[in-house]
Image (cartoon, rainbow, N blue to C red):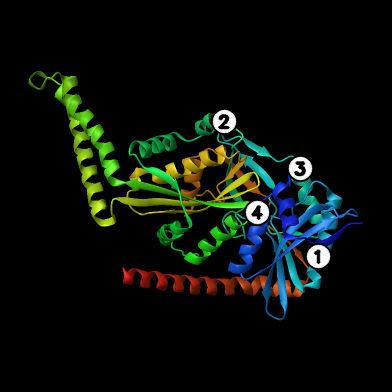
Amino acid sequence: MLKLKNLEKEQFDEFVRTNKYKSHFLQSLSWGEFSKIKKNVTPYYLGLVNEKEEVVASTLLLEKKLPMNRCYLYAPRGFVIDFKKKELVREMTKKVVEFAKSKKAIFVKIDPDIIRKSINYQNEEKIEEDYDKIFETLKSCGFKHQGYTKNFETMQPRYTFRIDLTQSMEEIENHFSKTTKQRIAKAEKLDTEVTIGKKSDIKEFYHLMTLTESRKDFISYNEDYYETLYEIFNGNKSSKATLFMGKINITKTINAIEKTLKDINNQISILPIDNLSKSAKAKLTELTKQKENILAEIEKYKEARKEYGNEITLSAHMIIEYGDKAWVLYAGNHNILSETYVNYKTYYEHIKYCKNKKIKIYDQFGTIGDLSKNNPRLGLHEFKKKFGGDYIEFIGEWDYIVDPLFYFVFTKLVPIYRKIIRKKSKKNLEEELQKENEKK
């Protein structure tokens, strides 16, 4: 006889973190505690236990309060269960629905970490063997599939890129696109660096996030959001949030460029200026052009140093580690000196970091399924693709409708309400940024 019960937090997190089926940071204790503070929800850490009180499945359920003493429950990337065991999934669903009814929930939403198909760097497609069976299992349990969305319409991205870090670093790098390798090499040639950030670097990280988001015409979170996330994930021993700060020291970069300039001057000096052959003239023209470009580049860096200082953080990423996986959760980039490709080097450095920590899966956390040329997020997709990971499509969202009437009202009216709230939040954040700029 199986029963659903509230688990002790440590017991819950241990089961999720070490689960071989569907471990995910969005099912972690850290995410539950963070969501409680910053997303205005109540987390429940539930486990399905057998007669011996052994946990056989679990789920983090986030309760979002609604008007009229109602709510809905959301299991982000849950349940944590072997979805191939139909009867176990059926029993888990039954118990969760009973729990939902006790909370007067309108519906229960899940979006399991179940892969529908993947496409590797060679464009070879793989359909997951058990996908159809799992799909039918969820359907038979009473869940309603919310469709194969193509963009970011759902709670979590339905597409992502994942790199298998059990490969050798040489294999991983071989899957990078040619331009990615070249850009990483250029960033290294310019003597840029990537360092591990501290809590005090959240302010700079937030600044870069606002620059990135303003270019994309949206502003999502305030500084306190990222600070709280960082604190909670580093406050629990089972999870970790790491900041990677991609920087340029302009004096060091100019010194690196001047070495190239010196090399060009040496090549020019050995050319027989008074008696140039046709090929030597072409060589001189090419070298002269390179010299002019380098001198212009040096002037550009000097101007940037006058305006921004000698050391500038150009890229800042937050990586979440949980179990044997890591996710690139947030990435912000400056709007200057993009030709240094510090963002590419920052990605490269945290891939190596995760590889060295024996992490098995590196998830770039979100891309699109609609690859049409007019999709404004196609650039983001193409950037992530260049790192050679598998292009993953998940199963998508499923709703178990507990109260059909309220569910109908909620699905029609709430999207309008959310749109209003987002506009208001964006306006408040823009006003906050304006005030900050006025202080400077």
Per the rendering, the mark at residue 147 is none
Q: Residue furthest bottom?
A: 68
Q: Residue at x 35, y 54 (%)?
A: 335
Circles 1, 3 touching at the beta carbon (< 8 Å): no
Q: Is residue 421 above or below residue 209?
A: below
Pair 2/1: label in front: 2
Cα–Cα span, label 3 and label 2: 28 Å
Mark 4 Cα shell of 10 Å, populated few (<14), some (14-19), many (≥20):
few
Q: Would residue 384 be seen by someone viewing this image from the given angle?
A: yes
Marker disc for residue 148: 4
Mark 3 and mark 2 in contact? Answer it, CB < 8 Å.
Answer: no
What amino acid is at disc 1? Answer: Val
Mark 4 / mark 1, whichever is N-terminal = 1
Mark 4 or 3, nearer chain start? 3
Q: Residue at x 34, y 68 (%)?
A: 437
**Residue density around tag 2, few if under 14, some if 14–19, many if 20 or more, within 10 Å:** few
Q: Which residue is mark 1?
A: 97
- For discs 3 and 2, the disc positioned in front in the rendered view: 2
Q: Specify the quadrant of the image occupied by residue 146.
A: bottom right
Residue at point 68% right, 79% down? 67
Of mark 2 and mark 4, the one earlier in the sequence is: 4
Distance Cα–Cα, label 1 vs label 3:
25 Å
Task: Mark 4 and mark 3 in contact? Answer it, CB < 8 Å.
Answer: no
**Sequence-wise first label, 1 or 3:** 1
Of the 4 image quadrants, the one containing the C terminus is bottom left
Q: Nearer the viewer, mark 4 or mark 3?
A: 3
User: Mark 2 highlights which residue?
Assistant: 168
Per the image, the residue denoted by label 3 is 130
Q: CA distance from mark 2 to mark 1?
A: 45 Å
**In front of the other: 1 or 383:** 1
Q: CA distance from mark 4 to mark 1?
A: 24 Å
